């Protein structure tokens, strides 16, 4: 089920207190590109200045219309030159601002992805991957529209507004005073409705993220959805979230439209009133026609600037909400972190692993002990299998060795060094994993195997595939090793996916090998071939095997029996069968004939 966004009323207090201050979080991303930003601002100032010069040229033309033809031509040529400069400056401003915005947003996207790709699994127990992707795409697109467009337009209109207002004052102080009376009436709806708009915009983005997460979850399990004929339920749930998003968008659009109507009407009503009074002054001889036209043009420019700012205010509100959401990801504290002064990991480790009174419960199920006081020492080069009923803690052992989680108490060591004292990427390089649910990337078979060791040659990849009994079926694909396997390996069977994952682990050639149900999806013939490869691979390596199928663990040096997060027995296959405990009962269920023969 998709996570429901926090209701808007619960967010409102935070929205009111933060206002546009959230945009300050963008400063570290803007700072490296100050020269580009300064160049864009200079281009913006120049174009704004040129825009303010145009009404002066118009006044000259009107007031000197009856002058000589040569002088009039000069005024028109000057006006044309100003227009050309304005066109060039506007194009330059657009190029600089857009490039600046794209560069900053690209850095934000990279920073967010760099952050979330390294987060421990506990982070993804609280947030769906679809929602994270929505923040990386939808929210950064909002920020791009602001940095690459809205901010530039806002600054330009601020300059036009302030410069136009000053020039209006020099043109006619009386008419300017009338215009200023309108300003408070314009600012109030901007502030009141703008605050409401920001709250609604954040709610809208939350629903979009939730619907994206829901769609991602359903589409990633589309075969299961279809097999259980739950298409209608999935459609209904997605439609419900989409409609909720639309409802929030509708309220946002209505609020923004109302604000725009109020602001534009007030502004242009004032312009009409000013124009009426100015016309009377011209008739009385207090103003020249050119001065009135100049004043009206400046008034329209100022009014247009205010109207544009009211529009941009809404964009800034949305961008502030989007920035908050991205900052939440960037500032999220991971439950698993590398130490400040990480201990060095030798180039070649022996592979001794020890659990010392480890207690652990998953964050999502804090009241259930996944491991309860587990103590175990695994010698270098030893093959140890973990068996037990579902939920006994077998896979948890693997996840703790990879330090996807940290134990609540106790410690886990590798060659005597606590995992928490080493950098995660450093000691993980010494481990190869075959997960229970093999991950196949949307790439070729060759690249999927090479994922285990990026610098591997094609010959090494094929050798690993042969050892994993994957070479024959890969060679039979339309383009062999270069065949595209589809998203999540949709073109492969479960057993083929598992053999690709095993080949990837073989290629890694790590001193510690973790096999989590590595042969569960293989047929009998492939299992024998892969088991032979695993037997060879596990020589001189510390190998941990998690298995429900006990036939795959009979040759292990030691078998550890887990139940309810505790070790209840250890020994070889024969020793455990002879004790007639849980392992013996599991063995009788799986191969009764074999036990009877023994």
Image (cartoon, rainbow, N blue to C red):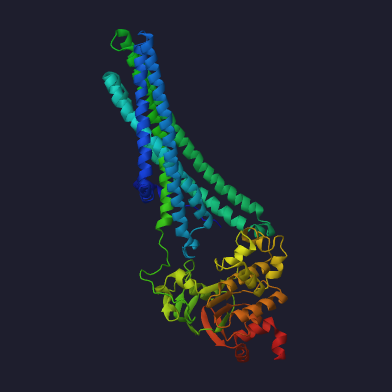
- Identify the residue shown where x is 30% and y is 8%: 284
Query: Is there any visible trace of residue 73 in the rendered image?
Result: yes
Q: Where is residue 215 in the image (x, y as percent from the top left)?
A: 58, 53
The image quadrant that residue 36 belongs to is top left
On screen, residue 505 versus residue 288, left or right, reads right
Q: Which one is in front, 394 or 293?
A: 293
- Asked if 144 appears above or below 579 in the picture, the reply is above
- Asked if 398 appears above or below 40 in the picture, the reply is below
The image quadrant that residue 290 belongs to is top left
On screen, residue 211 versus residue 12, left or right, reads right
- Identify the residue shown where x is 42% and y is 79%: 417
On screen, residue 504 versus residue 362, left or right, reads right
- Identify the residue shown where x is 40% and y is 28%: 85
- Asked if 277 appears above or below 566 in the picture, the reply is above
Q: How many labels, in total? A: 0
Q: Position of residue 487 (x, y in %)?
A: 62, 58
On screen, residue 161 versus residue 203, left or right, reads left
Figure quadrant of the C terminus:
bottom right
């Amino acid at each position: 089920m998709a996570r429901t966004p926090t209701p808007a009323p619960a967010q409102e207090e935070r929205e009111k207190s933060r206002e546009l201050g959230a945009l300050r979080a963008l400063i570290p991303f803007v700072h490296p590109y100050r020269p580009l930003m300064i160049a864009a601002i200079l281009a913006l100032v120049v174009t704004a200045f040129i825009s303010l010069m145009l009404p002066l040229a118009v006044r000259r033309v009107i007031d000197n219309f009856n002058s000589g033809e040569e002088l009039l031509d000069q005024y028109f040529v000057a006006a044309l030159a100003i227009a050309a400069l304005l066109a060039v400056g506007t194009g330059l401003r657009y190029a600089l601002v857009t490039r600046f915005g794209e560069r900053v947003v690209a850095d934000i996207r990279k920073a967010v992805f760099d952050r979330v790709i390294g987060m421990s699994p506990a982070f993804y127990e609280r947030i769906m991957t679809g929602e994270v992707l929505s923040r990386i795409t939808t929210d950064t697109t909002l920020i791009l529209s602001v940095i690459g467009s809205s901010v530039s337009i806002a600054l330009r209109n601020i300059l036009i507004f302030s410069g136009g207002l000053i020039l209006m004052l020099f043109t006619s102080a009386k008419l300017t005073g009338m215009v200023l009376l309108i300003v408070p009436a314009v600012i109030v709806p901007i502030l009141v409705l703008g605050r409401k708009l920001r709250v609604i915009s954040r709610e809208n983005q939350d629903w979009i993220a939730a619907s994206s997460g829901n769609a991602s979850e359903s589409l990633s399990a589309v075969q299961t959805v279809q097999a259980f004929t739950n298409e209608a339920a999935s459609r209904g749930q997605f439609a419900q979230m989409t409609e909720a998003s639309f409802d929030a968008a509708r309220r946002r659009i209505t609020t923004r439209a109302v604000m725009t109507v109020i602001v534009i009407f007030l502004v242009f009503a004032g312009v009409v009133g000013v124009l009426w009074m100015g016309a009377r002054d011209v008739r009385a001889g207090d103003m020249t026609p050119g001065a009135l036209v100049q004043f009206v043009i400046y008034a329209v420019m100022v009014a247009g600037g205010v109207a544009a700012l009211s529009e941009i205010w809404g964009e800034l509100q949305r961008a502030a909400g989007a920035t908050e959401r991205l900052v939440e990801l960037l500032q999220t504290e991971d439950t698993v972190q590398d130490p400040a002064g990480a201990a060095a990991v030798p180039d070649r480790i022996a592979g001794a692993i020890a659990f010392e009174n480890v207690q652990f419960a998953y964050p999502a199920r804090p009241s259930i002990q996944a491991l309860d006081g587990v103590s175990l020492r695994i010698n270098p080069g030893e093959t140890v299998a973990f068996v037990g009923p579902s939920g006994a803690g077998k896979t948890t052992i693997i996840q703790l060795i990879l330090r996807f989680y940290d134990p609540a108490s106790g410690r886990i060591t590798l060659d005597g060094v606590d995992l928490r004292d080493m950098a995660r990427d450093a000691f993980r390089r010494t481990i190869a994993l075959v997960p229970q649910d093999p991950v196949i990337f949307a790439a070729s078979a060759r690249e999927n195997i090479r994922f285990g060791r990026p610098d591997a040659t094609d010959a090494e990849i094929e050798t690993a595939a042969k050892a994993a009994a994957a070479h024959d079926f890969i060679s039979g694909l339309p383009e062999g090793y270069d065949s595209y396997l589809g998203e999540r390996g949709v073109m492969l069977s479960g057993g083929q996916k598992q053999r690709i994952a095993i080949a990837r682990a073989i290629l890694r050639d790590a001193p510690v090998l973790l096999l989590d149900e590595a042969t569960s999806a293989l047929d009998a013939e492939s299992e024998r071939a892969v088991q032979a490869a695993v037997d060879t691979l596990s020589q001189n390596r510390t190998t941990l095997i998690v298995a429900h199928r006990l036939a795959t663990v009979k040759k292990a040096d030691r078998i550890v029996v887990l139940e309810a997060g505790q070790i209840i027995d250890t020994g070889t296959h024969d020793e455990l069968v002879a004790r007639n405990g849980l392992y013996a009962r599991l063995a009788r269920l799986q191969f009764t004939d074999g036990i009877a023969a023994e």
